[in-house]
Image (spheres, grey):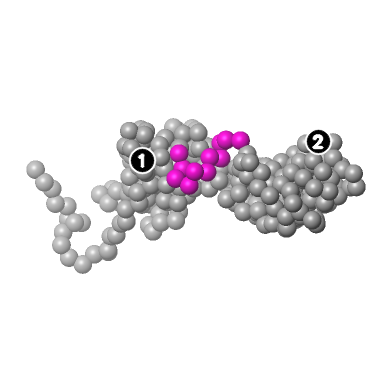
Amino acid sequence: MSFAYLQNLPGIDTAVETSENEFLFGPAHTWNVMGVQLDSGAVDSGNTPTTTLRKGLILGVITSTGLYADYDPTATDGTQIPVGILAEAVNMYDARAGAVRAKAAKMVYAGHVKAASLVNLDEYARLVLGPRCTWDDLRFTHLAFTAPVAKTADYTVLSTDSGKAFTTLGASGAVIFTLPAVGSAARGYRFRFHNAVDQNMTVTAPAGKLITFNNAAATSVAFSTAGNKIGATVEIVATPDGAKYIAIPSGANTMTVA
């Protein structure tokens, strides 16, 4: 038996459009899917209307209810932790009830994933989901730092450099590394810098956004003391909210904080 609802009768109405977003690749047996219950308040803030959740939306789970909703790095209800990816688009609005309501859905929690096809992927989500996902760009942020990349001149560090180690090997002058902007998108950022030559090396953050020895609002750390430059190493990690960076030096090299 089929049903025809009054709201679906032929005639002039608002156009409804959709687009397919295939974010999975590789053999189907590598995809792991589970059923979840979406909270009625789940939204897709980048879509119109926001009550239509696109395939590929990263999800978190509300701690108090166990219901799933859109991953939000600024939330405090549990959805600030990404847990999986919406497998199929879901319209949260129920036309018969005239309101949004909780909906059943399927969530991919492991598999081969096209990073660029996800709706709300950030570096923190990539870091948390990394142990369960194989990214098509082969950036495995859950592993150790990459082999050092040499920079012989000033370099502006990119968000996509997260997980990389840099060295000044081959530099004939001072090298300044400038960190990316802070904010919720910076959650999960981590970088490592090695000074391999007898030249000054400086790591600069946005003004007042660097936490290091005896200073919670520094802007830069530098290795510029004669006889204390070669071998200097500092690791930079973002705070859990992405609002600041933390500088973690290693070794006995003198570090100048500004």
Predominant SS of the magenta segment:
loop
Q: For the residue marked with disc 2, what is the amino acid?
A: Gly
Report the residue that reaches farthest toward the bottom: 12
- Residue 23, x across and y down, in percent: 38, 47
Residue 251 has which mark? 2
**In this view of the protein, which residue sits in the foreground, 144 or 89?**
144
Q: Quadrant of residue 108?
A: top left
* Secondary element type, mark 2: loop
- Give the CA distance from mark 2 to mark 1: 44 Å
The numbered mark, 2 or 1, whose residue comes first in the sequence reads 1
Q: For the residue marked with disc 1, what is the amino acid?
A: Gly
Q: Residue at x 52, y 43 (%)?
A: 139
Residue at the spot of label 1 = 26
Q: Is residue 31 above or below residue 225?
A: above
Q: Residues within 10 Å of mark 1 (few under 14, many from 20)?
A: few
- Residue 41, x across and y down, in percent: 42, 45
Which span of residues is magenta-colored? 134-144
**In this view of the protein, which residue sits in the foreground, 109 or 224?**
224
In the shown orientation, is residue 112 left or right of residue 159?
A: left
Q: Residue at x 50, y 33 (%)?
A: 131
In the shown orientation, is residue 4 left or right of residue 49?
A: left
Let me know if residue 136 is in the magenta part.
yes
